[in-house]
Image (cartoon, helix red, strand yellow):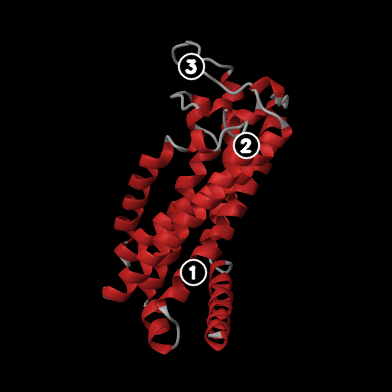
Amino acid sequence: MKDKFGGFLQRLSTMLKVDARRMFTMPTVYIMLGISLALPVLILVMTSFMGGANPETGEAVETFTNVWQAIGSAGGTMRMDLTSMCNINLLYFLVAIFVCLFVGEDFQSGYVKNLFTVRSKKLDYVLSKTIVLFVAAVGMFLLYFVGAMIGGGIAGLSFDVAAVGASAGGIIACMISKVFFALVFVSIALTLATVGKARLWLSILGSLAAGMLLFTMIPMMTPLDSGAFNVVLCVFGGLLFAAGLGAVSNVILNKTSLV
């Protein structure tokens, strides 16, 4: 048993090194990270230039007044306005697209067929992809946070935490919750990518559709005034999805053709 576990860890470590090296030599990951940094800057600066009014009609429109609105809203309510729709939650769709692009490239290039023929097991592949892609998702969320601080400073927005009904601890808990909730999107997109394989359009459409179904849950699970309960819920929920859908992905790879 010990030898088997040691062999599993050695295979997983090797697979992680390969996936990490492949991911960080792809231009796509840097494009996604750049978008994550630039997106909040553009949103906050452009909406502040609008001055809360539609430039064509002159009518008042909802706009950002506080930098923390770019991270979320307190109370866990989902509103259909600018500040609720154009915030950090948009990154979940970007994460899903990146997962599909990264995994889809493996199938399009024939890399997986060669990989499984030579040495690797499909479970190792799924675990490695989940871990590496989650690390990329963490980087995207952290860069969005940095971009929001930069954009808020340029736009002259308020940084008052109490004005949005939150606290410094709540915002930290909110970010931790959002990061681990990304595991849900990584797992779903990875499963759909193993279904779509080289058909990239299919995996992306499926992932975006699944993301739309979950989108209204994000404010409830990761409000700006999050606490320990939200963190625990998102951590265990993310790990549960990763384990469950990882097993599904493993079955799909074992039972279907690799083309």
Residue 3, how many percent across, how many down?
56, 88
Residue type of the residue flagged with mark 1: Leu
Tell me which residue sits at (58%, 44%) in the image: 177
Residue type of the residue flagged with mark 3: Asn
Dot 3: element: loop
Q: Is residue 35 above or below residue 248?
A: above
Identify residue for label 3.
54
Count residues near mark 2 (Cα–Cα under 10 Å), then give few for <14, some for 14-19, many for 20+. Answer: many
The disc placed on residue 41 is 2
Residue 208, how many percent across, how many down?
37, 47
Q: What's the CA distance linking mark 1 and mark 2?
A: 34 Å
Identify residue for label 1.
127
Q: Of label 3 and label 1, which has the lower sequence position? A: 3
Which image quadrant: the C terminus? bottom left
Q: Nearer the viewer, residue 54 or 238?
A: 238
Is label 1 or label 2 in front? 1
Q: Nearer the viewer, residue 75 or 129?
A: 75
Q: Of label 1 and label 2, which has the lower sequence position? A: 2
Q: Are marks 1 and 2 in contact (CB under 8 Å)?
A: no
Question: Quick check: can you spot residue 1?
Answer: yes
Dot 1: element: helix
Is label 3 or label 1 in front? 1
Q: Of label 2 and label 3, which has the lower sequence position? A: 2
Q: Nearer the viewer, residue 155 or 12?
A: 12
The disc placed on residue 172 is none
